[in-house]
C-alpha cells in the first residue's frame, strides 16, 4: 500500500484512476474526480506514511451486482502542507486488491 499511497499522492488523474476498481472507474464522473484531485493536491507532496491500523474486513453485496471482500485501514500521513489521516478500503480482485475507497481527512484542506 505504500506504493499506492505514494502514487495516488502524486495527484495525477490517470494514476489515481489506475488504482481504482473497474466498477468505480465505470461509475465515477471524471469531472468530479478532477475537482476532487485538484482539492486534494492542496496537501502538496507526500512526506511520510505512518503505521497502518487495520479497521475491518467485510464481505458484502454491491449495488452494481455481485459481492466482494473489503479490507479497511486507517493510515496517518504527513504532507508538505499538513498532516492527514487516510482511510483506505481495498476490494479483493482475484489474487490482489484494488482501491475501492480513498478518503483523506486534514484540516489543511480548509486553509
Image (cartoon, rainbow, N blue to C red):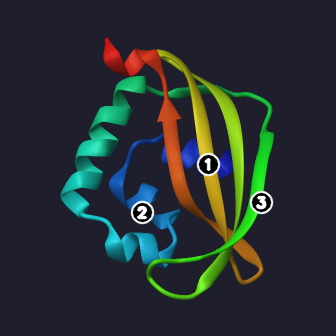
Q: Earlier in the sequence, mark 3 or mark 2?
A: 2
Q: Residues within 10 Å of mark 2 (few under 14, many from 20)?
A: some
In the depicted view, which residue is nearer to us: 24 or 15? 24
- The circle on residue 17 is 2
Which residue corresponds to the image point at 62% horizontal and 82% vertical from the top-left? 67
Percent x, y for residue 71?
A: 73, 59
Which circle, 1 or 2, is nearer the viewer? Answer: 1
Is residue 51 found left or right of 49 in the rendered image?
right
**Apparent side of residue 66 relative to residue 48 in the rendered image (left or right):** left
The residue at 24%/64% (across/down) is 29
Precedes in sequence: disc 1 or disc 3: 3
Residue annotated with mark 1? 88
Residue 28, numbered label: none
Q: Are marks 1 and 3 in contact (CB under 8 Å)?
A: no
In x, y percent, where is residue 48? 66, 25
**Quadrant in which residue 95 is drawn:** bottom right
Determine crowd level at label 3: few under 14, some 14-19, many 20+ residues with C-alpha closer than 10 A.
Answer: some
- What secondary structure is found at the residue carrying circle 3? strand
Q: x, y percentage for residue 86? A: 59, 36
Residue at 80%, 31% in the rendered image:
51
Q: Which residue is mark 3?
A: 57
For disc 1, the neighbor class at 10 Å (few under 14, some 14 to 19, many from 20) is: many
| Real-space CA distance between mark 1 and mark 3, rounded to the nearest whole angstrom | 12 Å
Tell which circle, 1 or 2, labels the residue nearer the N-terminal end.
Answer: 2
Where is residue 40 drawn, in percent x and y?
37, 34
Q: Is residue 1 visible?
A: no
Q: Is residue 82 above or below residue 66?
A: above
Front residue of 9 and 26: 26
Residue under the point 49% across and 65% down: 20
Tell me how far mark 1 sits from mark 2, CA to CA: 15 Å
Q: Is residue 29 visible?
A: yes
In the image, farthest residue toward the bottom? 66
Amino acid at each position: 500500500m505504500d506504493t499506492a499511497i505514494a502514487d495516488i499522492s502524486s495527484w495525477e488523474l490517470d494514476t489515481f484512476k489506475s488504482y481504482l476498481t473497474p466498477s468505480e472507474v465505470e461509475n465515477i464522473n471524471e469531472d468530479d474526480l478532477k475537482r476532487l484531485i485538484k482539492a486534494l493536491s492542496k496537501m502538496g507532496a507526500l512526506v511520510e506514511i505512518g503505521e497502518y491500523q487495520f479497521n475491518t474486513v467485510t464481505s458484502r453485496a454491491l449495488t452494481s451486482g455481485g459481492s466482494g471482500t473489503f479490507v479497511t485501514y486507517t493510515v496517518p500521513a504527513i504532507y508538505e502542507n499538513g498532516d492527514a489521516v487516510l482511510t483506505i478500503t481495498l476490494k479483493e480482485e482475484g489474487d490482489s486488491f484494488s482501491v475501492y475507497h480513498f478518503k483523506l481527512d486534514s484540516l489543511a484542506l480548509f486553509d
